[in-house]
Amino acid sequence: MIFEQLFDKTSSTYTYLISSGKGREALIIDPVLDHVDSYIKILDKLNLKLVKVIDTHIHADHITGMSELKNKTNCETVMGDKTPAEIVSIKIKDQENISIENIKLKAIYTPGHTYESFSYCMEDRVFTGDTLLIGGTGRTDFQNGNPYDSYNSLFNILLKLPGKTKVYPAHDYNGKFFSTIENEKKNNPRLQVNSADEYAEIMNNLNLPDPKLMDIAIPRNLKLGAK
């Protein structure tokens, strides 16, 4: 399997390129517009055909590369069926599978950070978007986020995956590449709570500044990054 984890320093965004092997179909998760040419170079080098590109949610801190990748490769764009973006090729439902050549991902509806957030599970790993971060969880104070939805997505969905499942988030701000479900259960400070109310109390009092690009990124990302 080909698995490339790519990083945007400006927004601390992880992008994932996945394929079952050279010369086969590929998909990309959470692309950043500024790096589309780099993705194309990797695809060309490995003789891969990009057939699907996925955003886990409407990002507020960078502009997605979905539209540009579609224009350059004729791939299909994929988001969860709760997305407000109208021009998505495929709106995937909870528990539906996304398939490319010898690769299958299951879509899991995990709202909380935003109301339309999805995670994507593949064999031994899960791509959690901003729902579950390494040592943290996605803020819930804009884009119809909700701490109680986040709690449910975490404790009743993601944390019930097998403990050895690798966690690959959409962002990391501390130089970490991945974690595991069991490690997050034990060591993630946001998860050491006894109730949804206790979790909501933490999330409602983070007092974080808005992402710098939010007013630009959200409108653009509703159009998959197109101007």
Image (cartoon, grey):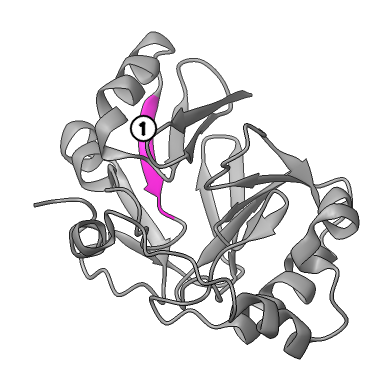
Give 29 or 58, whichever is nearer the viewer.
58
Q: Above or below — where is 83 with respect to 198?
A: above
Task: For label 1, count other residues whose C-alpha is less than 10 Å away and answer few (under 14), some (14-19) or many (20+).
Answer: many
Q: Is-magenta flag for residue 86?
A: no
Q: Secondary structure at mark 1?
A: strand
The image shows residue 129 at horizontal and vertical percentages of 54, 55
Q: Residue at x 60, y 63 (%)?
A: 131
> 69 or 36: which is nearer to us?
36
Tell me if I can see residue 152 in this picture: no
Magenta-tinted stretch: 49-55
The three-letter amino acid code for the residue at tag 1 is Leu
- Identified at 60% across, 35% down, the residue is 102
User: Magenta: predominant secondary structure element?
Assistant: strand
Q: Nearer the viewer, residue 51 or 176?
A: 176
Q: Nearer the viewer, residue 208 or 101?
A: 208
Q: Which residue is mark 1?
A: 50
Rendered image quadrant of residue 203: bottom right
Q: Residue at x 21, y 47 (%)?
A: 67
Image coordinates of residue 49 in percent, x first then y, are 36, 27
Say above or below: 15 vs 116: above
